[in-house]
Image (cartoon, helix red, strand yellow):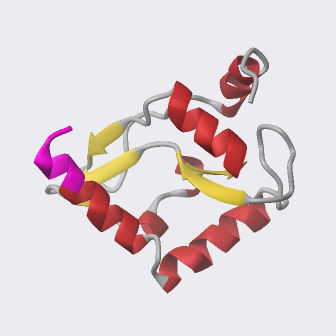
Amino acid sequence: MDKNFNMIKEKYYRMLNRPEWFKRREEIIKRDNRCCLVCGSRSDLNVHHRQYHTIDGNPRKPWLYENKYLITLCRGCHSLGHKLFRVPRFNVKKKNCPGMSIPAEEFKRTKQYVKF
């Protein structure tokens, strides 16, 4: 990984400790009925960004992503997803963002072949 990517990642992780993200995270978990959309677990829930956006070299604030780019996963499925798939990254210049990453249904089919 290059130095620029590491700086973006560091900024992004700092933003995940902001109150704006905690509020947005709770909204997504509530939307998804407080369960992992892959395995149905109700514990250790995370909100996964299905893709990452940068704007002029800076990470997009995690709480500003559209709903379609956020999904509730348990810690195990979230970790496994990051091991199995590369989360797409886009440099966004407009309000609308291109593409989607791995759909939940495809992730479910893949997960059945992987043991934790």
Measured from the top left, where is residue 98 in percent x and y? 37, 38
**Is residue 53 visible to the viewer in this orientation of the structure?**
yes
Asked if 89 appears above or below 86 in the picture, the reply is below
- In the image, 21 versus 69, the foreground residue is 21
Measured from the top left, where is residue 50 in percent x and y? 51, 43
30 left or right, relative to 92: right
Asked if 11 appears above or below 48 in the picture, the reply is below
Residue at 72% x, 20% y is 114
Measured from the top left, where is residue 93 in percent x and y? 21, 51
Span highlighted in magenta in the image: 1-6
Residue at 33% x, 50% y is 53
57 left or right, relative to 67: left
- Residue at the extreme front of the image, as rendered: 116
**Is residue 93 visible to the viewer in this orientation of the structure?**
no
Residue at 22% x, 52% y is 6
Residue at 26% x, 49% y is 92
In magenta segment, residue 31: no
What secondary structure characterizes most of the magenta part?
helix
**The N terminus lies in which quarter of the figure?**
top left
- In the image, 39 versus 55, the foreground residue is 39
- Residue at the extreme top of the image, as rendered: 113
Measured from the top left, where is residue 107 in percent x and y? 67, 27
- Residue at the extreme bottom of the image, as rendered: 19
**The C terminus lies in which quarter of the figure?**
top right
